[in-house]
Image: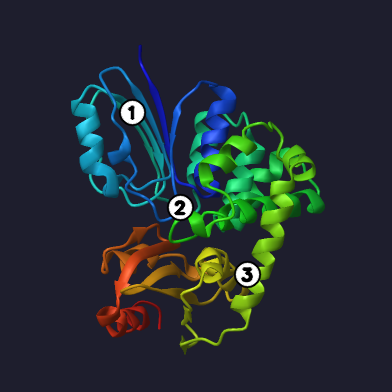
Amino acid sequence: MALFYDVFNGDADGICALHQLRLSEPRASTLITGVKRDIALLERVRAQPEDEVTVLDVSLSRNAPALRGLLAAGARCRYFDHHFAGEVPEHPNLEAHIDTAPDVCTSLLVDRYLSHAHRAWAVVAAYGDNLTAAADTAAVPLALGETQLAQLQALGEAINYNAYGETVEDLHYPPADLYLTLSNYRDPFDFISGEPVFDILHAARLDDLYCADELAPEYESAGGAVYVLPDEAWSRRVSGSWSNRLAQTHPGRAHAVLTRKSGGYSVSVRSALERTGGADELCRKFGGGGRQAAAGIDLLGESDFDRFMAAFREAFG
């Protein structure tokens, strides 16, 4: 009997993408996920011929060898993603839905695939991924008021916030558990009003943002700013949310948020919202990746700090 595997990023985009699919295609599966930066997930799958693997919001370029191995073993794979993919394998068992446009996230790709069956969850994910304009546009057919849109945005940001950390122990909830809790709700407004998880995450996010707002930039210009956060659980949790807040507050400049860790820094980069592009290209120079508007580096060594700063200034000013 064929087995099913759902492999997904632990952020708002990955969780909401899977939720949409399983609302339309309910089935039991093995869940494989982790913290936001836990991207090389396909190597955990031990699929056999005719097993089906669904992959959501993890870079194909980082998972290409494992993907080829699964296809060679006879597994079938559906792949939804919006990050840099590299060369997409051509194989009869691979169904790839890849779109790297800067105004697209994986949940919007799934929304398109499902003919907009669960659009509100795609809007939640887009807000969580800091694609505010895309979320606003996607929400138009829902005819929601400003208060309801603000609720969906707060939910997306709270789910996304929960994904950031060096390990699952840094998070308030393991992403798989958060998905399973959320999977009980067809309507995001029912989740917001009926699930204490939302209130806990929303309040914790605001507390961590308050701590980050007290920091001064390491570097600042008209084109960009760089901040360095301490090696603390709160800073690891808030790095993505704060990067998004900086981008929204200063749409004309790019931002890099470096969080200290053993051996160097983890890095979140956001390109300027007014001229999206360049975040992924910068991060790939240091072994990272992502998309044009938002990208990251798992480990920037201490010896690479000055080189990164020079590359940031060259890219963004």
Q: Amino acid type of disc 3?
A: Asp
Residue 38 screen position, x and y as percent:
38, 52
Q: What is the crowding at mark 1: few (fewer than 14 residues within 10 Å), some, or many (at least 20)?
A: many
Above or below, comparing residue 30 to residue 106 in the picture: above
Which labelled disc corresponds to residue 124?
A: none
- What residue is rendered at 40% in x and 62% in y? 295
- What residue is rendered at 70% in x and 40% in y? 188
**Marks 2 and 1, how far apart in space?**
22 Å
**Which of the pair 148/138 is nearer the observer?**
148
Q: Can you tell which quarter of the image residue 313 is in?
A: bottom left
Q: Secondary structure at mark 2?
A: loop
**Marks 3 and 2, how far apart in space?**
17 Å
Residue 275 screen position, x and y as percent:
48, 69
Q: Amino acid type of disc 1?
A: Cys
Which labelled disc corresponds to residue 208?
A: 3
Residue 263 screen position, x and y as percent:
30, 74
Q: Residue furthest top?
A: 1
Residue beneath label 1, please? 77
Would residue 273 appear left or right of 201 to someone viewing this image?
Answer: left
Above or below, comparing residue 58 to residue 97 in the picture: below
* Quadrant of the frame with the C terminus: bottom left
Tag 2–tag 1 contact (CB < 8 Å): no
Above or below, comparing residue 158 to residue 109 in the picture: below
Tag 3–tag 1 contact (CB < 8 Å): no
Q: Secondary structure at mark 3?
A: helix
Q: Can you tell which quarter of the image residue 252 is in?
A: bottom right
Would residue 197 appear left or right of 236 to someone viewing this image?
Answer: right
Residue beneath label 2, please? 35
Residue 55 screen position, x and y as percent:
39, 36
Q: Amino acid type of disc 2?
A: Val
Tag 3–tag 2 contact (CB < 8 Å): no
Q: Secondary structure at mark 1?
A: strand
